[in-house]
Each structure stands twice: as C-alpha cells, then as structure tokens.
Amino acid sequence: MTSMKIALGADHAGFELKEKIKAYLAGKGISVADHGTHSTESVDYPDYARVVGEEVVAKQADYGILVCGAGIGMSIAANKVPGVRAANIHSEVEAQLSREHNNANILALGGRLLDEATALQIVERWLSTPFSGGRHERRVEKISALERAEAQ
C-alpha cells in the first residue's frame, strides 16, 4: 500500500475524522492529497466531493476518501462525477464488499457516526481489498454503460 496516493476531502462535520485518517495514512507511508476543508467552519460538501472525484477519475490519485457528517451527502455528490463509484460505508464488511464486488474508488464516511477506531479499521480493510473481477467486472461495466447513456 505504500506506493498508493489517496485524495482526501471533508466538510466541516468530517474535518476532525479526516485529520485522523490523514495521520493514519501518512503513518503507513501512503501519499495524501488533502483537498480540505481545513477547519470546522461551515462549508459545502459538494465542492470537496467534486475535487476528490475528479482527481480519482483523472488517475491523479489511486483512490479517494471523503468525510462528512453521515457520509451520505459526500457519496451522493461524488457519484455525480462520471467515473466515480463512491460507497458510503459503516462497517468493515461493507468496505470489503464495496471493493470486491463494486470496485468502489471513493470511500465515504460519516464523521458524526463512526468513532476513530472503527473508521480506521474500515479504511484499512477498504484499501487492502482488491477488486474480484470476474462476474463483478460485467456488472461494474454495466454501471459505466448507464453513465455513458446518461451523458448522451
């Protein structure tokens, strides 16, 4: 995992957890592009979801991690960026399945819902789980086809 680069973003409700995740990743030697926010002052989460999503889709980062109050708003906003497959995750099992089955490229977390230990376990499982491919590849391609059809 050490040659990996993660694009990181949060709104005011996710700021504190984002900072803990950033320190955790840095401690593992993972490169982090922190796109903010940089305080608990109120901001609009779609702005951060877009920047992180665009960086991941452009392959300037391997994956993205977004944190807001519940993870819901960030995941909805990030999924509007073509090519993003953001998953709002609350457990290690969901983290694993989102990578194995859906090839999720952005992890969305709820800073008001998850304690630090749980969030870091989720991050670890998510980053260490590869995409299974096989029958799941066909399904992920169908998601991409839906996206392409919508763009026309």
Image (cartoon, rainbow, N blue to C red):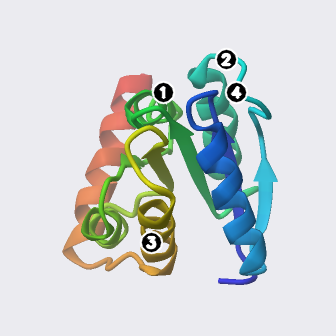
**Residue type indicated by callout 3:** Gln
Q: Nearer the viewer, mark 3 or mark 1?
A: 3
Q: Which residue is mark 3?
A: 121
Q: Nearer the viewer, mark 1 or mark 2?
A: 2
Q: Quadrant of residue 71?
A: top left
**Nearer the N terminus, badge 3 or badge 2?**
2
Q: Is residue 16 left or right of residue 98?
A: right
**Nearer the N terminus, badge 1 or badge 4?**
4
Between the residue at mark 1 and the residue at mark 2, the CA separation in whole angstroms equals 14 Å
Q: Which residue is mark 4?
A: 40
Image spot of residue 67 (x, y percent): 54, 41
Q: Is residue 96 left or right of residue 59?
A: left
Image spot of residue 96 (x, y percent): 32, 72
Between the residue at mark 1 and the residue at mark 4, the CA separation in whole angstroms equals 20 Å
Q: Which residue is mark 1?
A: 77
Between the residue at mark 3 and the residue at mark 1, the CA separation in whole angstroms equals 24 Å
**Residue type indicated by callout 4:** Thr
* Residue appearing at x 44%, y 38% in the figure: 112
Q: Which residue is mark 2?
A: 43
